[in-house]
Image (spheres, rainbow, N blue to C red):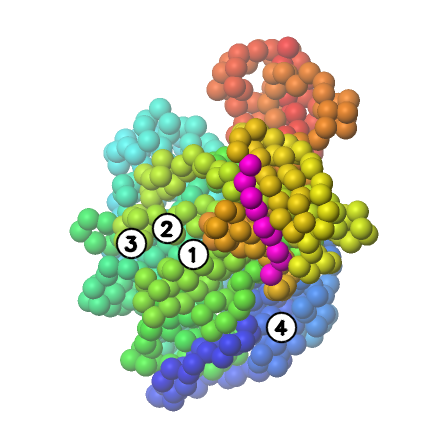
Amino acid sequence: MFLKLRAAASCYRYFSNACPSNLKIVPQRPINKLLIANRGEIACRVMRTANRLGIRTVAVFSDADANSLHVKMANEAYNIGPAASQQSYLRGDYIVEVAKKADCQAIHPGYGFLSENVEFAELCQQEDVIFIGPPASAIRDMGIKSTSKYIMSAAGVPIINGYHGENQSDEHLMEEARKIGFPLMIKAVRGGGGKGMRIAMTEADFIPMLQSARTESEKAFGDTVMLLERYVRSPRHVEVQVFADHHGNAVYLYERDCSVQRRHQKIIEEAPAPGLSEELRVQLGEAAVRAAKAVNYIGAGTVEFILDKEDLSFHFMEMNTRLQVEHPITEMITGTDLVEWQIKVASGEPLPMTQEHIRKQGHAFEARIYAEDPNGGFLPGAGPLDYLSTPELSATTRVETGVRQGDEVSIHYDPMIAKLVVWGKNRGSSLQLLIEQLTNFQIAGLQTNINFLIDLAKHKHFQSADVHTGFIDQHMATLFPKKIVPPSKVAQMALAYILNDRVQSSGGLGSNPLPSFATEYNFRPNYTLARSITIKVGQETYTVEVKTLGGAYSVRINGGDWIKISSVRRKPHSNRFLLETNIEGHVSCYNAVIIDENVTLFDEHGLIEGEIAQPRFLATESSMGNLDVSSVTSPMPGVLDKVFVKPGDTVKTGMPVAVLIAMKMEHVLKATKDGVVKSIPNSEGSNVRKGVVLISFE
């Protein structure tokens, strides 16, 4: 029976029915205090359910996370070391020590970090602390992809052709690669989240891609063993949520489609997967349950399949022995709280439902909001969240986040800012709500992928559910069109900036990163004033002249015709200050955010950013110097991990010169022209900002 979700952010829909019968006798260990061995939105998500269940929570944090939201939400919090995750969040011994010190009965690892770490699960068992996850044996069997392939094949789960052997020499792997054929996939056997994964399109690509995957895998997982798989062109990525308890029960909670990805990482997920027959849905679910039972699984897990887009045949890819980032969409269509299930199953209770009672209803989407540059190859970013305004939460809209306005997206961790989750009665209504709420997710001061997500959700092929893992590459031209800025937007930017200037000069805003009219409602200057400002939007520069005549304005752009505009502020909503403009009979509303010389407008199309050009006399001496210097610069904030050259070396175009680590990913930097190395300003291990010169040439 479905219970309607109340319009409160912390409540989720759930089922109520009798517990399964014929249960094994399993001792129960009540959990009344829980340590969350994770950070950010993951920790906050677990805490919300724990709080609802009356369970006290303990947070752990690195030096970089001392003021984070998850620390503030917890009943207690303990510092566990420096910012680098290897010295803090990946130190299982520290975390177990904290759990015992704080008298916690259990540890929830979240997803990522130690959630699939065999040694950590075993340590918890040794120290008599409940690990809210599967047995260490299941993590070991499914965490090593080569082992999992053998187990799945024996259990009757279809697997994809490839090499999963122990001989890891370059020569043997090349020989196996030739047998499989190109293109092929190179994967770290302990990998996940796209890390340690490369595609070798040709034989010539194989060794460089193999070495890059090994290096990344060693940093992320402490392991360099690789497997090879036939690369299925244009597959769909479909995964099934499974759950099992200590009593021998196992169920599936339907599937999610996670096909749309960049850098082999998911970006938009939906549940259920569109276009599948109910018969195929059952086949996927039953195969996933067989996979779980084959390794005596307990708790929440996700069995991932490659689904051929043409004939809808499916093959086992891997099993994630943890709760997944995208689990909220499963909760939305099944009316469950999977974290609650995890806690209860870990304490010895049976599953709350049997398979016949699990029903799906409606359709849900999850969009991952990242600090990244879609137009720059989705390179991750970092920095402060100067302005953050999220959609209003309801029974159909959910926001999972671990940050607040003013917090910083750190170079040390994943650049995800939040997850936006929506639910509708069908795919069409859910997708429309997703687009609307993406426009209501407003961030300024830090580049994000929100505009790209809006364009993606509006794309005709996505609308028709024609999706696969190569979707973004296939539709690159239409997903990244050249944006033409309407003159009306430039006029609105100029007007917002000028009016904000006046509020500041009257002692209002000061330097606070707030929208225009933050202190004055329906502000209408009642005097005549003419002003000219220069605004850069993208690669274009505009000269805007504004005349104030009573409560109206005349605006001219680049010497063109004068445009009549009236503007008033609408009633404040949350931390948004909406301006309504009437431009020659066309009335529109937008949110304007002014941060220093940057102007950001938010409307139904997403955001548009502009920068007020400084007068030349305000430019600093360094900014007016010679900028035509041949160099390799940092494309994003990160850690300079390796430098392959030294002063005096001769390099050729395309030659790798350095490796940058950012957001747990390895990025190889290459020379863009032939030259001789002049200097290397930063040493290996240095934290570097975006745009910093790493290597300069003669």
- Helix, strand, or loop for circle 1? helix
Q: Nearer the viewer, mark 1 or mark 3?
A: 1
Q: Which amino acid does label 2 sit on?
A: Lys
Q: Mark 1 points at which residue?
A: 435
**Quadrant of the frame with the N terminus:** bottom left
At which x and y percent is residue 420?
49, 60
Comes first in the chain, label 2 or label 3: 2
Q: Check contact, mark 2 vs mark 1: CB within 8 A.
A: yes
What residue lies at 61% left-to-right and 26% top-to-bottom? Answer: 633
At which x and y percent is residue 634?
61, 30
Q: What residue type is labelled 3?
A: Ala
Tell me the crowding category of disc 4: few under 14, some 14 to 19, or many 20 or more residues within 10 angstroms, Cα based.
Answer: many
Q: Is residue 639 magenta?
A: no
Q: Which amino acid does label 1 sit on?
A: Ile
Comes first in the chain, label 1 or label 4: 4
Comes first in the chain, label 4 or label 2: 4
The picture quadrant where one finds residue 44 is bottom right
* C-alpha separation, residue under disc 1 versus residue under disc 4: 37 Å
Q: Mark 3 points at which residue?
A: 465
Q: In this view, does 569 lie above or below 446?
A: below
Q: Which of marks 1 and 4 is in front?
A: 1
Q: What residue type is labelled 4?
A: Leu
Magenta extent: 562-570
Q: Name the residue under label 4.
A: 34
* C-alpha separation, residue under disc 4 versus residue under disc 2: 42 Å
The picture quadrant where one finds residue 681 is top right
- Helix, strand, or loop for circle 2? helix
At which x and y percent is residue 370?
53, 49
At which x and y percent is residue 227?
37, 42
Q: Name the residue under label 2.
A: 458
- Helix, strand, or loop for circle 4? strand
